[in-house]
Amino acid sequence: MDVRIYVGNLNKSTTQDEINTLFATAGTVTSVEVATDKGTGKSKGFAFVSMPNQAEADKAISMFNAYSLADSPLKVNVAKPRVEHA
């Protein structure tokens, strides 16, 4: 099962491809989801990256937590489980 990683404090102009390219240096990236505002379609400043195993996810977290991307220090950690709202 894939491990989801939260990537916060993204510059609003950072693209899905840029995140994918960065995280691919740490291991295999199975998906990247940039959170966007439903009304405007603009980035909310965070994303989720999925990697196939814990070892690669841990490597990415250690490599990129506090890493400066587009002049923004990233906040990278294991994503909390999704909470379904009723």
Image (tube, rainbow, N blue to C red):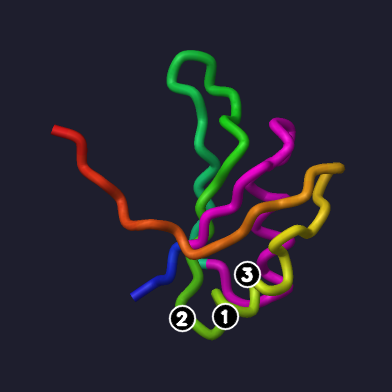
Q: Earlier in the sequence, mark 1 or mark 3?
A: 1
Q: Where does the image place residue 48, in percent across and percent down from the top left?
A: 51, 52
Marks 2/3: CA–CA distance = 12 Å
Q: Which residues are magenta?
A: 5-29
Q: Which mark is residue 81?
A: none
Q: Where does the image place residue 86, in percent across and percent down from the top left?
A: 13, 32
Please name the residue that numbered disc 2 is placed on.
53
Q: What's the residue type where badge 3 is placed?
A: Ile
Q: Where does the image place residue 51, in percent across and percent down from the top left?
A: 50, 71
Residue 3 is left or right of residue 12, and the answer is left
Q: Is residue 61 above or below residue 80?
A: below
Q: Nearer the viewer, residue 45 or 23?
A: 45
Q: Earlier in the sequence, mark 2 or mark 3?
A: 2
Residue 84 is left or right of residue 39, and the answer is left
Say which quarter of the image contains residue 77. bottom right
Mark 1 and mark 2 residues within 8 Å of each other at the beta carbon: yes
Tell me which residue sits at (50%, 37%) in the image: 35
Q: Which mark is residue 56?
A: 1
Q: Which quadrant does the N terminus fall into? A: bottom left
